Image (cartoon, helix red, strand yellow):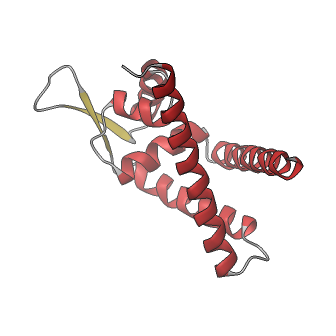
Amino acid sequence: MTNGIDLLFLLHETAHQLRLDADRRAAAHGMTRAQWIILLRLERQPGLSQKELAEILEVEPITVARLIDRLEERGMVERRDDPADRRIWRLHLRAAAAPVLAALHAERADMLSIVATGMDPTMIAALKDGLQRMKTNLAAGTRSRILERDPA
């Protein structure tokens, strides 16, 4: 059991260090980590709604709305009407986001270089597979516990 606890602490502490590093890097570019995450998400999935983005980020919709307001003020994101539902805003990147995304990608590459120092590609692949398996196991365990409590 001690090894399991050690692994959990190690995962938590590593994630914490990554967040601190990302916060510092984002601040150096006059942004927040949350704003960077939004830009990355919109780059990968243009046209997300504020509600969908809030669900992905696991925050309240009002939090996303405020972050989008700031990004919109900087000319990086725009809200567009949803053609099927006028109550929904679809979020899209604007040209001003391109240099910020380029900086973000460079920062991410540097972070990966730092965390992967001393690891060969086989070890990195095994780590990615293991972390993906842990994530899948946790999601499945969460779903099964919910079903056990509320089988309806």
Front residue of this view, candidates 55 and 2: 2
Total numbered badges shown on the rendered structure: 0
Front residue of this view, candidates 48 and 72: 48
User: How far across and down, in percent of the image, does residue 110 sit?
Assistant: 67, 66
Q: Residue at x 48, y 55 (%)?
A: 101
Residue 32's quadrant in the figure? top right
Side (left or right) of 51 relative to 124? left
Q: Residue furthest right?
A: 2
User: How far across and down, in percent of the image, does residue 7 sit?
Assistant: 80, 51
Q: Residue furthest left?
A: 84
Front residue of this view, candidates 133 and 144: 144
User: How far across and down, in percent of the image, does residue 95 sit?
Assistant: 34, 51
Q: Residue at x 71, y 47 (%)?
A: 15
User: How far across and down, in percent of the image, does residue 25 sit?
Assistant: 68, 50
Indicate the quadrant containing the C terminus: top left, top right, bottom left or bottom right: top left
Q: Is residue 143 above or below residue 107?
A: above
Residue 73 seen in this snapshot: no
Residue 54's quadrant in the figure? top left
Q: Is residue 119 above or below residue 132?
A: below
Q: Residue at x 48, y 34 (%)?
A: 143
Residue 139 seen in this snapshot: yes
Side (left or right) of 59 relative to 7? left
